[in-house]
Image: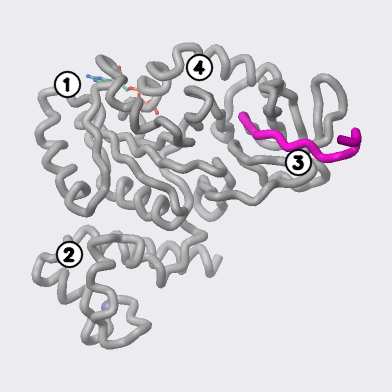
């Protein structure tokens, strides 16, 4: 290989415009993006030019198999690339939002990422009510794993094997507990990375990739509750919701938005209870959000 040939490395930490990359031999370098281009994400495979023993420049990104976005009100930021699995963490206490689970599942379906729902804190007495709620998602064909991360993390391990997983969930569901159980020295490593990237204080925009073993990886992003859907087309939404998908094709108009149109098969199904009211409400809310974002 000529010294000028590009080397491929993986982004294992991203923090604004600063990155830590890992080369095939496991060695790590800090890297910055050439020019103003900053749209790289943790998990990206990038072409780099090594500058010296500590630093490299990112020249470009290899094709991604998947891409997750973080969204604030109108903007989306890349958060993780090439993940194969989205682990949605819920718990009986504090109560979880079914809408958030619904949104995460749509994003996973849209991104071609396998979702896994983890109901954590199953040791609690309140777990029965949460279990009953989870029956709905199971009925739609999604995998639901009951866990008590504080007591026993082992049941989660086979689900992570061979995957690049990213954890999402509301505050207090137990994401940190899960991460710490899987990676006892994760906190120390985050600190190390912050020092290397000279970030000083922690911010909400960084993500870190950890190796569980040679084939299994976990991307952790503090504060990741949900992520962007703005790249999804509104007309694709019902096809990303299994309970709505089932009725597609039955509407009178091929471009039915399933709102006020006559002969809408989805609304008919909602009236008989075959589609839950909150699921139609989620469809409408997402349609409205996408329209508002497009108009912005
Ligand atoms: N009973 C029980 N409590 C748990 C379990 N896992 C986590 N907890 C508790 O739930 C609380 C929240 O856990 P965290 O791991 O901090 O939750 P988090 O999702 O990382 O929350 P944020 O840091 O706010 O995003 C803590 O008090 C944990 O001790 C569990 O399996 N069983
Ligand atoms: Zn319709």
Instruction: Give percent across and percent down for residue 255.
Output: 37, 82
Indicate which label's residue lies in the foreground, 1 or 3. Answer: 3
Q: Name, please, the residue furthest toward the front.
A: 1
Above-or-below relation of 228 to 294: above
Q: CA distance from mark 2 to mark 4?
A: 42 Å
Q: Which mark is residue 67?
A: none
Residue drawn 45% across the image and 64% down it? 290
Label 2: which residue? 275
- Which residue appears at 41% of the width and 72% of the height? 235
Contact flag, marks 2 and 4 (Cβ < 8 Å): no
Sequence order check, earlier mark of 2 and 1: 1
Locate residue 265: give its quadrant. bottom left
For residue 123, the mark is 1
Give the CA separation, mark 1 to mark 3: 46 Å
> Which label was assigned to residue 186?
4
C-alpha gap between disc 2 and disc 1: 32 Å
**Is residue 20 at least partly visible in the picture?**
no
The residue carrying mark 1 has its beta carbon less than 8 Å from ligand 1: yes
Could you tell me which residue is drawn at 73 percent across and 37 percent down? 8
Q: CA distance from mark 1 to mark 4?
A: 25 Å
For numbered disc 3, what is the local secondary structure?
strand
N-terminal-most mark, 3 or 2: 3
Q: Which residues are magenta?
A: 1-13
Residue 90 appears in which quarter of the rendering?
top left
List x then y, in percent, for residue 124. Answer: 15, 22
**Is 21 positioned to the left or the right of 246 in the image?**
right
- Mark carried by residue 47: 3
Q: Is residue 190 visible?
A: yes
């Amino acid at each position: 290989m000529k010294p000028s040939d590009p080397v491929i490395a993986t982004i294992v930490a991203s923090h604004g415009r600063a990155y830590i990359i890992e080369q095939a031999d496991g060695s790590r370098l800090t890297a910055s993006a050439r020019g103003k281009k900053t749209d790289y994400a943790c998990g990206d495979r990038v072409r780099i030019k090594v500058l010296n023993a500590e630093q490299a420049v990112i020249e470009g990104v290899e094709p991604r198999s998947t891409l997750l976005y973080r969204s604030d009100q109108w903007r989306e930021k890349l958060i993780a690339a090439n993940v194969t699995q989205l682990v949605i963490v819920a718990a009986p206490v504090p109560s979880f939002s079914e809408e958030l689970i619904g949104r995460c599942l749509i994003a996973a379906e849209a991104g071609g990422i396998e979702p896994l729902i983890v109901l954590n804190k199953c040791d609690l007495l309140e777990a029965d009510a949460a279990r009953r709620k989870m029956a709905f998602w199971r009925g739609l064909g999604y995998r639901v794993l009951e866990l008590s991360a504080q007591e026993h993390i082992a049941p989660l391990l086979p689900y992570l094997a061979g995957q690049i997983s990213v954890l999402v969930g509301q505050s207090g569901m137990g994401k940190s507990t899960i991460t710490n159980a899987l990676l006892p020295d994760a906190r120390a490593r985050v600190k190390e990375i912050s020092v290397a990237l000279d970030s000083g204080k922690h911010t909400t925009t960084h993500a870190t990739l950890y190796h569980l073993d040679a084939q299994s990886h976990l991307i952790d992003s503090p504060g990741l509750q949900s992520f962007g859907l703005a790249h999804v087309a509104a007309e694709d939404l019902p096809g990303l919701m299994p309970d709505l998908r089932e009725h597609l094709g039955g509407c009178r108009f091929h471009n039915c938005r399933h709102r006020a149109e006559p002969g809408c098969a989805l609304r008919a199904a909602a009236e008989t209870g075959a589609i839950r009211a909150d699921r139609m409400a989620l469809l409408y809310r997402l349609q409205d959000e996408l329209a508002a974002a497009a108009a912005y």
